[in-house]
Amino acid sequence: MNTPSLPDPHDRPARLSVGVVGAGRVGPALAAALQLAGHRPVAVSGVSDASRRRADALLPGVPVVTPAEVLAAADLVLLTVPDDTLPGLVEGLAATGAVRPGQLLVHTSGRYGVGVLDPARRAGALPLALHPAMTFTGTPVDVQRLAGCSFGVTAPDELRLAAEALVIEMGGEPEWIAEEARPLYHAALALGANHLVTLVAEAMELLSEAGVTAPDRMLGPLLGAALDNALRSGDAALTGPVARGDAGTVAAHVEQLRAHAPRTVPGYLAMARATADRALDQGLLKPDLAAALLAVLADRAEDGVPRQAPGAAEGDHPEERPDGEDQDGTDR
């Protein structure tokens, strides 16, 4: 297999013509980043009006054409379509002869490695899996966010240097992921990022229900500090009523959630159980307090109002305990 000419990006390598199949939030941003590095976007495909608007905003003047026409025009093609669409798209492009030998074919799915590109590889394409570990908005700010962004990279050995060069040119940092580890890698990112959005949105709704006029302003510093602490210290950063073993407080939380936002109860209980397990493993949650806490967390949503936990007295306040910290830890 012949590899494309992609020298060290610091030497400003020969430029490539770039095409995008799937003008969602990711593709135009990556193509715009490559354009800043000197490459030349030449074609993009998109069906919806939103896709066309994104392409026009991020890649002005680049024609919107069919996927086959994108592949005909570009040396480097970004396949930025939903995960479930990718295998069929690759098979279709290969079957119709749209793939050219020596063409760099890059997909941005976190789930898949390069195996999903095998039909195109058999047609002579050079396969790369470059997944930016970043959330995208579909606006020009995405290009700026790529600076320092980690990319989950999977590539054949002979294309590792090419993959690394492209990531660096987009402003990212390559992180090598084995083919068989891609689903686990992607699950980890979804657990941390996608579920975080759900947790934050639910927290803002509950704060609004409680009468807070600016939930975002209240949560911003707290969540920023919690995230920073977690990234620095891992489980040692756990705080809040679960880590402290405040069974009475947790029981009150569950009661209020059942009354005001019953849809949030399963998630709260699941995350609280996971937090309790990790706090126990780290020695943060005292065993003598864990039994009462776990009794509360064992209550099922259909049981109605949770039982008062054994040993949990009304009016028990965390600040009255020597080791207590009055900080909400429900974001973990």
Image: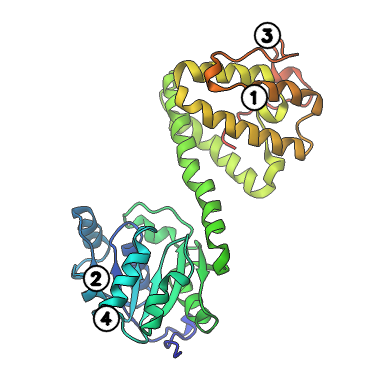
Q: Which residue is mark 3?
A: 314
Find the distance from the CA under tag 2 to the CA under tag 3: 65 Å
Examine the rendered structure and indicate whether residue 127 appears above or below residue 192: below
Residue that numbered label 4 is attached to: 97
Q: Secondary structure at mark 4?
A: loop
Q: Which mark is residue 67?
A: 2
Mark 2 or 1, which is nearer the eye? 1
Q: Residue furthest top?
A: 314
N-terminal-most mark, 2 or 3: 2
Q: Secondary structure at mark 3?
A: loop
- Nearest to viewer (mark 3 / mark 1): 1
Q: Are marks 3 and 4 in contact (CB under 8 Å)?
A: no
Residue at the image point whose x is 67% and y is 28% from the top: 242
**Residue pointed to by mark 1:** 298
Label 2 neighbourhood size at 10 Å, few (<14), some (14-19), many (20+)? many
**For the residues bearing labels 4 and 2, Cβ distance under 8 angstroms:** no
Tell me if 234 is positioned left or right of 172 in this view: right
Q: Earlier in the sequence, mark 3 or mark 4?
A: 4
> Residue 247's spot in the image, x, y percent?
68, 20
Amino acid marked by disc 3: Glu
Residue in view at x 64 percent, y 36 percent: 274
